[in-house]
Structures are given as C-alpha cells and as structure tokens.
Amino acid sequence: MLFPWDMNLEIGNDVIDDQHKEIFSRANKLLSAMADGKGREEVDKVVAFLTNYVVNHFSEEESLMSRHCYSDYSRHKNQHAQFINNVSRLKMEFETQGATSDLVIQTKKHVCNWLRDHISKTDKAFGTFLKNKS
C-alpha cells in the first residue's frame, strides 16, 4: 500500500475512523492509478469519488463539532476548505496535463501527506475533546 493506514491515527470515534480508513483506501487507489498510467477515466472516477466522499466526511465531522460546541471548529473547518481547494486544483491540473510525475508528487503531498498530518493532529485533538466530554 502506498499510503498505509496507521492505527495510531484512530481518534476514538468509530464512524469517523472508518471514514478515515476509506479515504486512505481511495487515496491509495488514486496514487496507484496515476503511477500505473491508468486512463483518464479511471483516475477521474477515483478523484470524483474521493472528492465527494471527503466533502461528505468533512460535513459529518463539522456537524459533530458543532453539536458538541468544539472551540476549534472554525480553524478545523478552514483546514477542510483548504483541502477541498487543493483537490480541486489537482483535478484541474490532471484534466489539462494528465497524470504527470509532478502531479503524482503533488497529489501525494497535498492529499496523502495533508490527510495524515490533519488526522494525526487536528482530528486527534477533536477525538480527545470528545473523549473528555463523555
């Protein structure tokens, strides 16, 4: 697996953790499709799924934060918006230039590394907050 899930990334909420695992799985499919030079249709399909899934996931996460009056909600939501913008930019680059080596590197940086960093820090902090509220 190009972008392995790590149990240390679990935040303690089964729904959110399962969604994070699915995002990792789809990010791996995207990287594999791009690295293997798969056709535009295959990459488009994975990017479309990943984009929609992440938007839904972020919406659920933000709703949970709002319901629990999470103090870092605004910053967290802004990070989600930045990620969606990065994915949109990468998708446009793919549509105009194809799966170049630079795009594969940028995808790993702006999708995979961002997700790992966001989950390990920002989402873990939210998970701790939820545990302390219980």
Image (cartoon, rainbow, N blue to C red):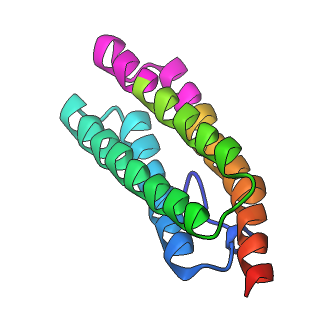
Quadrant the C terminus occupies? bottom right
Based on the displayed image, in which of its 4 quarters is residue 11 positioned? bottom right
- Is residue 28 depicted above or below 99 in this figure? below
Q: Which residue is rendered at x = 57% and y = 61% of the image?
A: 66
Please give left or right for residue 18 compared with residue 70 in the image. left
Using the rendered image of the protein, determine whether residue 29 is visible from the camera's viewpoint.
no
In this figure, what is the number of numbered marks?
A: 0
Q: Give the range drawn in magenta.
A: 89-107
Residue at screen point 57% across, 32% down: 82
x, y percent for residue 114:
65, 41
Picture residue at 56% right of the left edge, 72% below the top: 17
Q: Where is residue 71 in the image (x, y as percent from the top left)?
A: 75, 56
Query: Magenta includes 59?
Result: no
Q: Is the magenta stretch mostly helix, strand or loop?
A: helix
Q: Which residue lies furthest to the bottom in this view?
A: 134
Residue nearer the viewer, 94 or 132: 132
Q: Which of 106 and 10 is in front in this view?
A: 10
Give the side of residue 88 with respect to residue 131, left or right: left
In the picture, which quadrant includes the N terminus?
Answer: bottom right
Write down the quadrant of residue 131 in the picture.
bottom right
The residue drawn where x is 56% and y is 68% is 67
Relative image position of residue 108 (x, y in whole percent) = 58, 36
In the rendered image, residue 99 lying in the magenta stretch gets the answer yes
Q: Relative to the observer, which residue lies in front, 66 or 7?
A: 66
Q: Is residue 94 above or below residue 131?
A: above
